[in-house]
Image (cartoon, grey):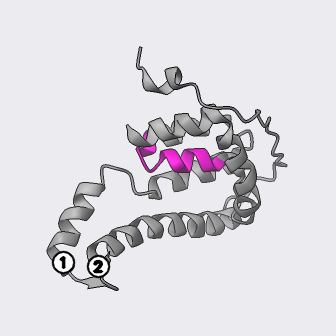
């Protein structure tokens, strides 16, 4: 709920389109485009809405790659499993007095999902043979203050 609220805040203020624009160069290197960022971010909350949001990606190969890597993002359903396993296996130690080993391992699990998604996308880019030309066309909305009515009130 918090993640989708923050995504709505970014979308309403005009930043989400700019995030897609800024990430396009990196995503091109692994066979995706900037529009793949939003499904991947949604994959942190739940992979199913993230996969469904790939419908706005016009290129068939990029849409298929995004669908295949979105489940690699660590969704919120995995959080209790990670918490229990880390609590059982990792000792309760601190580094530099403020960084918990358990917290660092949790952060590593999330970062591992993102890195593996990019690596898998890079490999699948060479395996999937669709020669459709890709264009990244996106309207950049104006910056504005978010309308609190949009995301603060459910009705």
Q: In the rendered structure, which segment of residues is drawn in magenta?
A: 36-48
Q: Secondary structure at mark 1?
A: helix
Name the image quarter holding the C terminus.
top left
State the residue lying farthest toward the left: 88
Figure label count: 2
Q: Position of residue 116 (x, y in %)?
A: 51, 69
Q: Is residue 108 left or right of residue 82?
A: right
Q: Nearer the viewer, mark 2 or mark 1?
A: 2
Element type where label 2 sits in the image: helix
The residue at 84%/46% (across/down) is 135
- Label 2: few (<14), some (14–19) or many (≥20) C-alpha neighbours in 10 Å: some
Q: Please tell me whether the stretch drawn in magenta is mainly helix, strand or loop.
A: helix
Residue bearing mark 2: 101
Q: Is residue 4 left or right of residue 122?
A: left
Tell me the quarter of the image containing the N terminus.
top left
Is 25 drawn above or below residue 37 in the view shown? below
**Residue located farthest toward the bottom when viewing the structure as drawn:** 96
Q: Residue at x 51, y 52 (%)?
A: 70
Residue at x-position 33% and y-position 68%: 106
Q: Position of residue 138 (x, y in %)?
A: 79, 38
Q: Quadrant of residue 46?
A: top left
Relative placement, left or right, of 41 versus 134 is left
For label 1, the residue is 89
Earlier-in-chain disc, 2 versus 1: 1
Residue 38 to residue 110: above or below: above
């Amino acid at each position: 709920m918090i993640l989708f609220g923050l995504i709505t805040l970014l979308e309403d203020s005009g930043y989400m389109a700019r995030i897609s624009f800024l990430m396009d160069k990196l995503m091109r290197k692994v066979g995706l485009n900037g529009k793949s960022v939003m499904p991947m971010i949604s994959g942190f909350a739940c992979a199913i809405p993230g996969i469904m949001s790939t419908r706005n990606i016009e290129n068939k190969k990029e849409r298929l790659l995004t669908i295949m890597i979105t489940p690699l993002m660590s969704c919120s359903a995995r959080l209790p499993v990670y918490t229990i396993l880390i609590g059982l296996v990792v000792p309760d130690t601190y580094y530099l007095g403020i960084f918990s080993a358990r917290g660092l391992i949790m952060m590593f699990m999330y970062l591992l999902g993102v890195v593996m998604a990019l690596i898998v996308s890079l490999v699948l880019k060479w395996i999937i043979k669709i020669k459709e030309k890709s264009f990244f066309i996106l309207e950049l909305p104006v910056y504005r203050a978010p309308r609190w009515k949009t995301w603060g009130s459910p009705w």
